[in-house]
Amino acid sequence: MTDNPPRSTQAITGSKRWLAFLAATFGSASQVLTLAVSGGALPYMQGAFSAAPDQMAWVLTSFVIGTTVATAFSGWLATRFGRKRFYLVSAAGFTIATMMCGFATSLSQAVLFRTLQGMFSAPLSPLGQAIVLDCFAREKQGFAVGVWSLGSVSGALIGPYIGGLLVEAHGWPWLFFLTMPASAMAFVMCWAFVPDVPPDRGRHLGFVGFGAIVVAISAMQLALNRGERLDWFDSTEIVIEIAVATIAFYLFVAHTALARRPFVDRSLFVNRNYAIGAALIFVFGALNFLQMFMIPVLLQTLGGYTIVDSGYFLGWRAAGLILSMLILVPVIDRIDVRLSFVGGFLFQVASAWSMSRWTLDIRGTDVAFTIFLQGVCSGIAFIPITMMAFSTLPARLRDDGAAMFFLMMTLGTATGTAAIFNVLTRSIKINREELGAQISVFGSVFRHGAAPHPAERLASLDAEVLRQSAMIAYNNSFLLIAVATLAVLPLAVFVRMPKAKAMDKAADS
């Protein structure tokens, strides 16, 4: 599917090593910061574009779809045209696409530019990691990747808060403009300090398999995003999109199983640990980022909080993520990673279940604590899932395995985001119908004089019904996240972690 780019033939030493390291860190940090702050812009963009909640889900999923599609062949492009050149194109394209997101004047423009933003951002993290590995000797690479990871997520600690201040002062486009300096610095520092890697002009890409999986992903995401609005299978468009996605996925499976040089090495799916790990990372992507997307909208539309407050609360998620990584990384080699995975997902269950009990009087301490737990889940669960997936995978399959692994995570994020906003929209409708049926001029509320004259109160009552309906819908959505997360835990039982000697043998095969 993809290959890791060939290692640089130029040694990176001295101060240039750390400047190249910063180039890699700035690139991945800009991608992480974009994910962290984009949810806060939704209420403002929804008003500016006069869009419904399910339509605004496109602003989130379009970015993830773009990332998913580009991830599938980013390794091939880096190998074919050279790592440095491709990193420069990605950083420059991401900067320009981010600027255009801020200048969008309609929902369709925002979706288009967000898709491009996602496509250009996809290579920044994997190529950044490759640059970091070139900067340090093998015995120091674990430390380097750990520092790089912490630097990449550190922007999410204060970025949403600073973004909230900028939005209040200058408007929602500044949530996008906020990330531009980091990606611009990545471009400049890569151009000046990162050595080039010779391209491999003969690298093959299975275009049939690649085209099939791109069509399948795009058609399925289109159906998920528009299904609730078009009443699902009562719509000819949705039926066609599902049919196209199904046929394309079948072609992808057939190509993988029968082609002489498939897009994805078929041996990946024979390895039980990798197959389970790929399923777990899909679920991780589908569930782990949802609260980060939903909470800013909930707090600003129903909780009475400002975007600055939302940014402050999202900082607690980054704090939980960083703290859990600092604690886990030094001991991960000495514990059973299956227990770490279960523990991480239990933090997710506790966080989502706690959110499902919120009311319209949301206390700030409750928000901070629950989103902190969600950040802890991110740090504790991701590392063991990665170790489980690759524990028995032969070295010759790790390039394809890594590409498919990240593809599954981003695809899970896109699918989960589209699905939860569909659940939210449908739940609001049902709740409003149920609550509205209890309030009429002939109902007991007015009959017993518990409310003023109907003509004076119906409008305000309707607004309150809508608020309560939305709050119940959020409760239902958070509860669904908790139940879905809990249902995944038994999969850890089917993972068989090998002994150290067996892992070494698998690595050498």
Image (tube, helix red, strand yellow):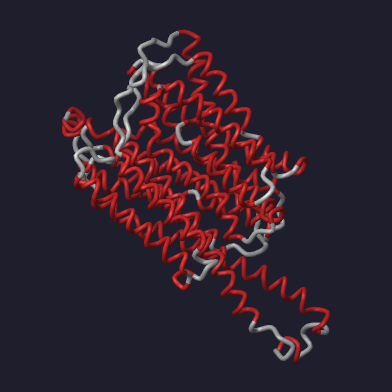
Q: Residue at x 72, y 75 (%)?
A: 462
**Residue 195 percent coordinates (x, y):** 44, 14
Q: Residue at x 59, y 62 (%)?
A: 358
Q: Nearer the viewer, residue 70 or 290?
A: 70
**Residue 347 percent coordinates (x, y):** 45, 51
Residue found at the far top of this picture: 14
Task: Please identify the quadrant where the C terminus is shown.
Answer: top left
Q: Nearer the viewer, residue 155 or 71?
A: 71
Whether 389 is drawn above or below 235: the answer is above
Q: Quadrant of residue 208?
A: top left
Whether 375 is drawn above or below 295: the answer is above
User: Left of 346 or right of it: where is 26?
Assistant: right
User: Left of 485 or right of it: where is 453?
Assistant: right
User: Left of 368 or right of it: where is 407?
Assistant: left
Q: Residue at x 31, y 41 (%)?
A: 337
**Residue 150 percent coordinates (x, y):** 49, 30
**Residue 340 percent coordinates (x, y):** 35, 44
Task: Please identify the quadrant where the N terminus is shown.
Answer: top left
Q: Residue at x 33, y 21 (%)?
A: 6
